[in-house]
Image (cartoon, rainbow, N blue to C red):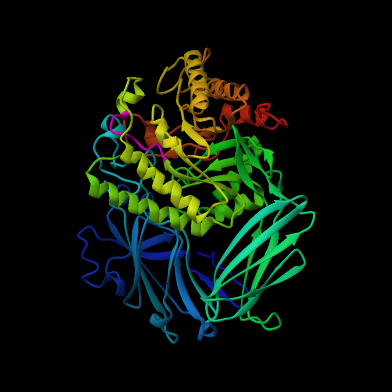
Amino acid sequence: MLYPQQNDKRNMLNLSDIWDFQIDPGEVGEAEGWFNGLANARPMAVPASWNDIYDDIRDYLGVAWYLTKTFVPAGWQGDRVMLRVGSANYAAKVWVNGSLAGGHEGGHLPFEFDVTALLRWDAPNTIAVQVENHLMPNRVPAGNTRGGLGAFMRMFPAATFDFFPYAGLHRAVHLYSVPTSHIQDVTVTTEIDGADGLVSVAVEASGESSGSIHLAGQTASLIFDNGAAQAQIRVADAKLWGPGHPHLYPLEVTLGDDAAPLDRYSLEVGIRTIAVEGGTILLNGQPIFLKGFGRHEDFAISGRGDNTPVTVKDYALMKWVGANSYRTAHYPYSEEQMRMADREGILVIDEIPNVSLQFGGGAEAIAERLRMCKQQMAELIARDKNHPSVVMWSIANEPMPADVMQRMSGAKVPPVDPSTTAFFQELYDLCRAQDPTRLVTLVGIGGGPVEWLESADVACINRYYGWYSQTGQLDEGRAALKNELDALYAHLGKPIIITEFGADTLAGNHSHPPDMWSEEYQVEFLRGYLDAAAERPFMAGLHIWNLADFKTAQGVMRAASMNHKGVFTRDRQPKMAAHFLHERWSQPGSDKPAG
Ligand code: BDP
């Protein structure tokens, strides 16, 4: 799915604005034709979550309606017009001038419909989006489940995950036009051959038999067969893409004759490879150690809504502390974030919202969850496949076997049910079939079955020794961490990244000797993990939980409805830990184990 763009052949209209909005708790809107107009509308920002805008709907997660009106420029007549929604959490249906254009399930990925036949050219067009965010056990992510960690960590609203279940139109809605004969998809893959880069480009197009690609001063022809064509360009002495040197080559794809093209699409190409060898991740053939964070798309008032100033600020902060990477915990981030990562040279582990998956509810329910995971994984790969920053797909965060509590307490347990391992194997296989050029991982919970990590290219684990276990005892926590890392590597023989470790910390709370929740405790906690990794050549990365404090549902574990494990506060001010990392990670070669 191509990101919409403006050029001499394509046009776009960003509908970010203040829309009409009305909640529909009785779910009568569709039958009553609310897509034609809302009787009791109030203003709502798009993009934004609705929850932090009005006090009466903070915890409202049912159906709500968004409506706006717009003229479509007369100059677009004769082209195909698409309506594209960047993200609607969780499910959506779209109407144009009273006719249903289509629907979509899954809260963090774009979807679009060809609405050409539904448009008016001589009057404003009414665009209505129905958004619904019920928390349900068979959704991905789930809510209102029983068992798992939720058994002792009751939250309101009853999400099974530790972030607020924000709802609404979270990213921009666009109308855009493409010529009747147009480029439908572009897939770029890169290889390194000596000092040269090889850029392969596969193009899908409607209605034309030829075209060309242009990159680094060279041109190659495209000859379409059944709507598909491929070409390759060799870039001599290529400037490779990577952290610290995020070189991007502009690629232009044209359809039809170059002298008078029918359509054009440009994107930026980073020439890079990613691979694994023993306990090491190789970027462009060289060992790379991932330093960075798990993050969230989260900010006051805008909620999970796309917030450009915060996006730009977060990249500046990551670079200031010396990070080179992050994970899109626990759902796909905006396309704007992926473009920033390409441009700023930040590596991304790209995750679907398969967070805290449980295996309850019977075979049919589990099959339904697998269907949804597959759909979101396929849509994510289709969206992000051309970003050099994306180096790894993450198929799950902390899935939980039925005996998760016994496992966490260290009790001896029987091997995990093989049907659960098969569930993840289907997702590993899907990623490898759709994108053989990137790594695949699963992020495991403390005590989680090692069987689920056996098919991963890199073992990613979240660990809280010294917080949830060895509580208040940093030395015992460090010892337990080291033991587990050595045993895990001896078993798996593949690179290990600790994708989460962190301590809740109230900014301004100090203690000596360090007590939990103090800034000193957070620094000493992080130092222990950094030291343990530095001593171990098979450690391939450390992602601190979290870049910034973020909002969660209410619960006894979460003071002020916030997770306070950020090294920055929610308004992006540094805690002591941010200064500690800035000093430690800005030294060249820091935390990069030898060998
Ligand atoms: C991990 C989850 C993450 C939580 C974190 C925590 O992956 O979403 O926010 O723990 O407890 O289990 O802070």
* Residue 62 horizontal/vertical position (percent): 27, 55
* Residue 15 horizontal/vertical position (percent): 47, 68
Residue lying farthest right?
Answer: 237
The structure residue drawn at horizontal position 40% and vertical position 44%, both measured from the top left corner, is 425
Q: Is residue 256 above or below residue 449?
A: below
Name the quarter showing ligand 1: top left
Q: Is residue 349 left or right of residue 69?
A: right
Q: Is residue 491 left or right of residue 314?
A: left
The image quadrant that residue 254 belongs to is bottom right
The overriding secondary structure of the stretch rendered in magenta is loop
Q: Is residue 331 visible?
A: no
The structure residue drawn at horizontal position 58% and vertical position 37%, both measured from the top left corner, is 292
**The residue stretch that appears in magenta:** 397-404
Q: Is residue 80 visible?
A: yes
Which quarter of the rendering shows the C terminus?
A: top right
Q: Is residue 396 magenta?
A: no
Q: Is residue 324 above or below residue 486?
A: below
Q: Is residue 31 above or below residue 110?
A: below
Q: Is residue 368 above or below residue 578?
A: below
Query: Closest to the observer: 102 or 358?
Result: 358
The structure residue drawn at horizontal position 47% and vertical position 42%, both measured from the top left corner, is 329
Q: Is residue 400 magenta?
A: yes
